Image: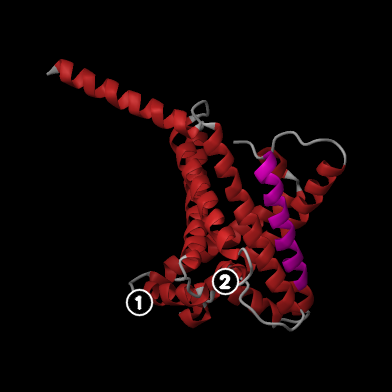
């Protein structure tokens, strides 16, 4: 009986070692890096649509709108499949980081490190699903899905409180992005950059990008919190609705243009991260 238990432990240990070895392979790392590029492409497209909205045009400035516009262009189907594979690989990379990473950290920091990795795995997994659904021709409007989800949530006891807390978390994330950009803390995610033009370019797209992304998240979180307080799920329309709501405010088109440029810059930063990220 004891021998059987030892054999099971050795087999489990070998499985863990094989899994960790696969996660550390250069091929897997290369594919995972393309996930940053895929996310960057989405942000550039969202920013371009938002910029069009700022000047009176139309479109959906969110992930589904960006993926839809990509699907309508020559070569778009290839990019959708490539984006799906890259984002899925990066999500798996984050899962492996949650399991194997942060071993030398203190216990409290270790759990924070792993929670962050899990959160990023969910984010990149959602991006992979967006790319995949449009590659298969079954993509849908994310604003409508956000509204439907919020309606169902608020039908539950305490649903409005949960929605408010989600909004508060997104507001906090927005503030975090702004601070990370202004204080250039994004360099901690990158390997040492070559001196000169590359470092200068990454510095500026990082600052402007993180601030723009943070402002977009702040507006989105604020709208969610207001919808929860007013008990009106009709006000929940996702990122596209948040940006369009920003456009309707005093000096809104100018503010939206600033956020749009920021989102484009954040996408460019992610493109650089695909090359220089610490993995």
Which quarter of the picture shows residue 75? bottom right
Secondary structure beneath label 1: loop
Of 134 and 123, the residue lying toward us: 134
Of 93 and 143, the residue lying toward us: 93
Residue range highlighted in magenta: 257-276
Mark nearer the N terminus (2 vs 1): 2
Q: What secondary structure is the magenta-colored segment mainly? A: helix
Q: Is residue 231 left or right of residue 76?
A: left
Q: Which labelled disc corresponds to residue 155?
A: 1
Q: Residue at x 60, y 43 (%)?
A: 33
Residue 130: image x %, image y %?
Answer: 50, 63
> Which quadrant of the rendered structure holds the C terminus?
top right
Q: Residue at x 35, y 76 (%)?
A: 155
Kindly identify which residue carries mark 2: 68
Q: Which class describes the residues within 10 Å of circle 2: few (<14), some (14-19), or many (20+)? A: many
The mark closer to the camera, 2 or 1, is 2
Residue 261: image x %, image y %?
Answer: 76, 65
Residue 162: image x %, image y %?
Answer: 43, 66
Of 159 and 88, the residue lying toward us: 88
């Amino acid at each position: 009986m004891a021998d059987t238990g030892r054999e099971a432990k050795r087999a489990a240990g070998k499985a863990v070692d094989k899994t960790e070895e696969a996660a550390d392979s250069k091929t897997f790392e290369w594919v995972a890096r393309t996930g940053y590029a895929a996310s960057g492409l989405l942000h550039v497209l969202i920013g371009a649509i938002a910029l069009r909205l700022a000047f009176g045009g139309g479109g959906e400035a969110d992930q589904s709108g960006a993926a839809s516009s990509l699907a309508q262009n020559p070569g778009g189907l290839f990019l959708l499949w490539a984006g799906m594979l890259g984002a899925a690989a990066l999500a798996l990379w984050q899962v492996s980081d949650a399991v194997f990473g942060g071993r030398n950290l203190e216990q409290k920091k270790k759990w924070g490190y792993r929670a962050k990795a899990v959160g990023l795995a969910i984010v990149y997994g959602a991006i992979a699903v967006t790319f995949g659904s449009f590659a298969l021709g079954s993509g849908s409007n994310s604003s409508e899905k956000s509204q439907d989800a919020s309606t169902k949530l608020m039908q539950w006891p305490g649903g409005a409180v949960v929605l408010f807390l989600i909004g508060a978390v997104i507001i906090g994330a927005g503030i975090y992005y702004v601070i990370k950009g202004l204080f250039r803390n994004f360099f901690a995610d990158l390997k040492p950059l070559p001196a000169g033009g590359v470092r200068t370019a990454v510095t500026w797209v990082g600052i402007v990008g993180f601030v723009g992304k943070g402002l977009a998240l702040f507006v989105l979180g604020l709208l969610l919190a207001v919808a929860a307080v007013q008990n009106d799920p009709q006000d929940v329309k996702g990122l596209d609705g948040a940006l369009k709501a920003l456009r309707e405010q005093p000096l809104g088109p100018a503010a939206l243009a600033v956020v749009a440029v920021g989102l484009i810059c954040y996408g460019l930063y992610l493109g650089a991260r695909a090359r220089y990220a610490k993995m």
